[in-house]
Amino acid sequence: MNVYSWQHIYIFVSSFLSFALIMLLVAFFILAERKVLGYIQIRKGPNKVGLVGLLQSFADLLKLVVKFKVSFFLVRSWLSWVAVFILLLLCGLYCSYFSMVYSGVYSGNALLWVLVISSLAGYSLLGIGWGSYNKYGLLSSVRSCFSSVSFEACFMCVVVLCGLVAGGYSLSGLFFYSWCMCIVLPLCYGVWIVGMLCECNRTPFDYAEAESELVSGLNTEYSSVPFTCLFACEYLIIFVFSWLGAVFFWGGLLVVPLTMFHLFFFIWARGTLPRVRYDYFVEFLWKWALVVLLFSFFVVV
């Protein structure tokens, strides 16, 4: 085997280990979210399964996996399975990207690859709702997909700004040097925080669900393994964007505590903030956020 074959094997193994570690973090993050939300609402979270409830997420995973629907009552098409596979591919690419950064693999266009990977989210969201043969799921998917596309426009500006500051589109330029873009461009950091909540489908921008529909949104017709994949992939994307926000705006020096801060921010936003009207949010992204980001170009240049 030549050197390139060993490099491919090394990248595959590191990506698999990154996926396993991130999913382990997701399990405990779900538990931490339920505990923090419990204290915010002046009640106790899960504390029965295992020592002080540490095994609650694993018990919930087992419960979700063993549940199933009778095949005659499945209201899904082949498109729904393709969309779930695209979402799994999206999460796998994020894990590969995460592992390559810490493995020392250099790429001069690493920041641009983030845009390519995140662009798959819209296709996955639209297919999940459209393939479920449920009108509420379709409405949820259209809302979520358009919100994701709106965020992509702002995300592209953020990536270009990071490239201008770092002098290139290599993530190592941001990871190994603390540029502190959040201090130079605080409004840009605020737009990123808002867009991060939207991209991860979290309160107050969780437009895949709505009280008037009284259903779960995208995953109305999903159960067992497909529902587990949708649920786990959402939290994996939360971790990845928390990590990207720490690297983009603070550099790699304090990436661990700032990633934890972003994760806690997701929980705090869910426990305290009300849902924003959809048209207000879309108007904010296209009418105000893009103006702020374009103004930031003049500041950087």
Image: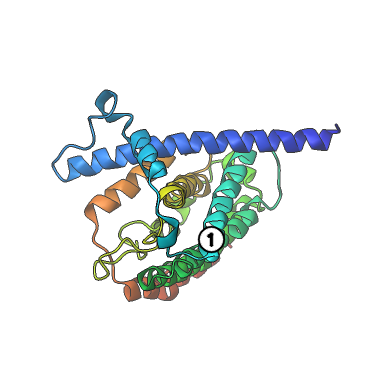
Please state, as top left, top right, bottom left or bottom right, where the C terminus lies in the image: bottom right
> Is 2 located above or below residue 143 in the figure?
above
Residue at the outermost top position: 51
Q: Position of residue 86 (x, y in %)?
A: 57, 57
For the residue labelled by badge 1, is the local secondary structure a helix, a strand or a loop?
A: helix
Which of these two is toward me, 247 or 51? 51
- Left or right of 264? Residue 149 is right
**Residue at 76% in and 35% down:** 7
Q: Is residue 53 visible?
A: yes
* Horizontal and vertical percent position of residue 53: 27, 30
Residue pointed to by mark 1? 83
Question: Does 9 sit above or below residue 209?
Answer: above
Extreme-left residue of the structure: 42
Q: Residue at x 23, y 29 (%)?
A: 48
Q: Is residue 50 left or right of residue 263?
A: left
What x and y, as percent, mark residue 44? 17, 37
Residue 190 in which image quadrant: bottom left
Which residue occupies the foreground of this view, 243 or 216? 216
The quarter of the picture where the N terminus appears is: top right
Of residues 137 and 268, which is closer to you in this image? 137
Can you see residue 118?
A: no
Q: Nearer the viewer, residue 71 or 146?
A: 71
Which quadrant would residue 135 be assigned to in this image? bottom left
Amino acid on which the number 1 mark rests in the picture? Ala
| Residue appearing at x 66%, y 48% in the figure | 170
On the rendered structure, is 48 left or right of 70? left
